[in-house]
Every structure is written in structure tokens, then in C-alpha cells.
Image: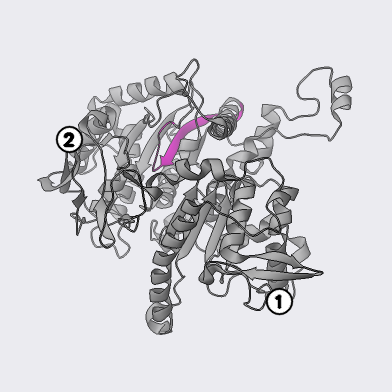
Amino acid sequence: MSTVVIQNPILNSPFVEPERHFHFDDDGITNEIIEGRRVSSYFVPIAQSKKRGGKQQLAFDTEWTQDRIEENRLVNLIRGRVNLWRQGGYVGVTPTTSRLLQHWANPDRENKLFFCQIEALETAIYITEVARKFGDAWIENELVSANDSSNPGLPRIALKTATGSGKTVVMAMLIAWQALNKFANKQDNRFSDTFLVVAPGITIRDRLRVLLPNDPQNYYRQLDLLEGHQLEQLQQANIVIKNFHAFQLREKTKATKLTKDILGNGQQGVFTESPDEMVRRVCRELGTKKNIVVLNDEAHHCYRRKPDGEEVKLVAEERVEAKQREEEARIWISGIEAVKAKIGVKAIYDLSATPFFLRGSGYSEGTLFPWVASDFSLIDAIESGIVKVPRVPVEDDSMTGESPTYRDLWGRIRDDLPKKGRKTDSVEGREPNLPMALEGALQSLYSNYKQSYERWAEQEQDRERAGGSTPPVFIVVCNNTNVSKMVLDFIAGWEKQVGEETIVQAGKLPIFANDDGAGKWRHRPNTILVDSQQLESGDAMSDEFKAIAGREIDEFKAEYRQRFPGRDSEDLTDEDLLREVMNTVGKPGRLGEHVRCVVSVSMLTEGWDANTVTHILGIR
């Protein structure tokens, strides 16, 4: 087993189809460069257990072996047909589509689009407008068959686009293509001017406002996706953006369980919405429009568990997480099924960097959604210079037996951490006593962060050169509230009762400390604690979480009143405030300006600026 270090992994231009790629052999990636584009395939990476030394390196450090690789047959077949069609000059499309493709693919554009963005649209267009004309009806038939096995009756097409490659731009292009064609020919039932965009949480939902033509920052104007008259036309489109939690059936009337049992007489819909009522609520802004197009952002969260599927052995907390993921996926897909039943769905476009079935879904973990039609993988994006190159941490010289301690950190510390369900007062007011391996991991990652932060601080002194850039952000993801509280106290400081006086003890990681060095709290915290799941769902935060994050929330409310004298911070919920802080971490003049570290309960998933987050430690 060899470790390959590639000093410069960029082989291709981001604006044309990849022409070269690094070869994989039985041991993983090599330095050998192969002419031509990489065949679409997927495989499961397995982390090495091997001590490494030296400085931080650009590296692909894997045990990806040939027997773990499976070719994406359908993707490669479709890709070949789309390539021929592209080379032939995009024949067989509507005049509207032709103009859009010429505009997007124009090599003289000032705002050039990535090849992967254009290819995703080409694939959707070819399947919708061209395939049947050139004897490729089999593509639609295969997609129907794939959906029938997993999503009966739902016309899903997945476009796999690497993280950081501009998935939201692809969504804007899909909307423009569909809507402008519908405006050009109202009778053409291949198209729609009505869209439901579904996001995995509120953070992403808010950021997807750039898909609204009337938004000041809309991508159609900002990225020159449309010409002036086309943008005016697009204003007529109906676009609604929701997070999938809106699909959850809500209570129509508050009542006790006893009242529900007596008056409800065991019938559904008396106190809870019916699916039709839910659809009316979610799609109210669409009016009487029928046969809409659905765009699923981060669509790997949307699936139905396979009946009689594969059962995997999960430990207690993994079992709880798997059940929660399954319930969220059920709500999402059931919501779309209800929309289709009520008002009709013409097409569903799934956008995701990872359209794979998750563990506990009944499918083998990592199985590609069979309705994926195009693929631009992370390694393709790296070789094209689109996304940042992952750096492998190499300061792990702490060994346990034959393996580096931090390679399998969770397995070494899980039994020494406070369990979920115990009240937070079990860790309140005590000196945080982290497992030695966890403390070492935090210190090791922090020392590397400190170097990045100091480089940023030096540049920031020259405002003209730095341009007011945001600082690097450090994220710690914890598995439960008790662990997050203990980690927060270690990083940022904690309160110690000395007689009748409360003294703030200094945090162990100075850049992230929330104490002022004189036994008091800073007015502007450097570290915040968030419950990602509760914030993203829009649900009210638990009393337990508010108790441990209350001081930070109060500080931000005070800062809000100071910054916006005419506004009443009490009109904002705690969730609104923390969400605003999260969305503006490190941004000058915004509420999250001073935040350098985020301690999260539950996974901080999609929606983060990948160019800002530089260090992540998972305690789960």
C-alpha cells in the first residue's frame, strides 16, 4: 500500500470538458496521467491506519481498490450521447433553448460558466427535448424503471455536481430553460413556468433566494445567465422556495391527547392536516397552477426506505440517527408525492454532490441513486481546479498500538463522554474534563488553525490587499448537548463558583476564548454554540439548549439593539438571531463578525461557505 502525494492536482480547465485524469490502480490513485476524461464510477473510500510525518501535504491518501469501484453505466451511456449532440451543434432543440445554450456556452462570456454546470443542463435538455428524436427513448425508459423501483410514480432525474461547483447556478439555469420555453409556447407540455424548490433546511432556503428573479442578488442578472428581455419575461414565473420540514402535517387545532381521542374518534384529519391541506399551505403562492417542476436541493436527503431492505447492525446512537434520517427522508418524499397527487408534477430535478443511499436506508450504504443522469465528481472538480484541494492532517504522531490516535478518534473516546439524555447540569459549573485523546486532537487542530489565523491577520492589516476578507472558521461537531457543553467550556471558558462570587475561567484555546482575561465574559463571543438540527428545521430550540446558550443569545441581542437602534430585538426569536449569526460568521459589519469557532450539536451540513471553513473536528 503506497501513499501518493500529488503536488499539483490540477490537470484541466474548469471551462471545457476534462481532457486528462490521474490513473487509479489496485492500491488507489497514482501519479500517472491518462489522456481523456475519467469514466463515471463510484467507490467507497477507506481511511488508512498508518503513521505519517512531515509537513502538511496536498494528498489523496486512500485505499480505493478496484473491487470497490462500480461503473455508472447509465451515466456513461448518456454522457456519450450528449457529447455527440454537443459536437453536432445542439440540433433538435427549441429556438429558445438554442439561444440559451449559445449564450451559456459562449467562450467570450465575461462570466464564464463551468463545463460541469453546462453539462448538467445539456443532460436535462437532451433527455427532455432531443433523445426520442435520435432513437434514444431508452434513456427515459431506464429512468422510469429506476424510479419505479425506488420512487414509484415520481419522475426524478438526478444531476450529480461536486460540492463547490455551483449547484445553485445549475438550478437557476434549469428554471430559466423551463420557464422561457413555456412562455414561448404555452401549449408545449414538456415545460412549466411554475417551480417548487425544496431545501434541506432554513439556512439553505434563505440562500436560495438568488433563484427569485426579483431578488436584488438574483443569479440571472448577477451571473449574466439571461439577457435583459429574458429576465423581464422570467419575472412572470412562479417560484416558491421551502425547506422540506414544511411538508410535515401540522396540527390544525391544539388539544390534549384525551380530547383528541374522544372527539377524533380515531380518525385522521380532525386535528391534523390532511396531505391535501398541507399541499394547499405549502403551494399557496402558486395559485391554481398545475404540473409544476420540483427542484430538490441536497436531494440525497429525499428517499423512501427500501421495503424488506438490507438490515445493518447499528449501535444505540447510530440507530437513533438512522431512524431520524429515515423519518426526515419520509417526510420529504411523502410531501412531493402529495404535491404530485394534488396539483401534478411534470419533472423532479435532484441536485446533490452525494446522491447515495445512506446507512440504514435498506440499500447498501453508498449505493448511487439509480436515476442519476449526469456526474461531475469531486475528484473531477479538483483536477479541473474548481474546488479546494483537501489537505491531509499529518501532525498525528500520537500512536495507540499500530494506529495514529486521531485516525479513529471517536472509537477511542466515545465511552468516556457524557451520554445523551442526561441533564446538562451534570456538566454545568465543573471544570471541563475531556478525554486525553480529545483534548490532544483539539490542541493539535487548533495549533494548525492558529497558523492560518495569523496569516489572515497579517493580510488583514493591509485592508486594500485583503479586501476585508473573512477569517478562517473552526467547527466542532458534537453528538449531543452534554458533549457540546463540555467542549464549549474547554474551548471558550466556564464559570466557577468561588464563595458567593462567580469567576469566569479562561478558555484553553485563546483565539476562541469568550472570557476577557479578568474573570468576566466578553461582550462579543468568539465562540458560539448552535443546535444545527433545531435551527435548520425551524423548530423552537429546546429549553435545555437555551439554558446553555442563553448567555451568548443575550449578548447577541444586546449587540443587535446597539447596531440597529430602530429595531426591536425582542421581535426576533432566539432561533432567528442565532441563524443570523451563523449566516454571517466572520463577515465585517455583521452580527457574526467576531465569531471564529462554532460548536455544533448535530451535523453542520450543507450551506456553509467552503472557502471560509478551514478546520473541522467531528466528535461523533
Is residue 179 at all visible to an observer of this figure?
A: no
**Where is 228 relative to 588, above or below?**
above
* Residue most extreme to the top: 308
Count residues near mark 1 (Cα–Cα under 10 Å), then give few for <14, some for 14-19, many for 20+.
few
Which percent across, then down, holds residue 469? 44, 73
Q: Position of residue 408 (x, y in %)?
A: 40, 44
Per the rendering, the mark at residue 562 is 1
Position of 132 relative to 480 (above/below):
above
Where is residue 210? Give x, y as percent.
50, 56
Q: Amino acid at mark 2?
A: Asp
Extent of the magenta region = 342-357
Q: Are marks 1 and 2 in contact (CB under 8 Å)?
A: no
Q: What secondary structure is marked by label 2?
A: loop
Image quadrant in which you'd find residue 517: bottom right
Q: Which mark is residue 26?
A: 2
Report the number of numbered marks.
Answer: 2
Residue 14 x, y percent position in the rendering: 25, 55
Q: Is residue 474 above or below residue 323?
A: below
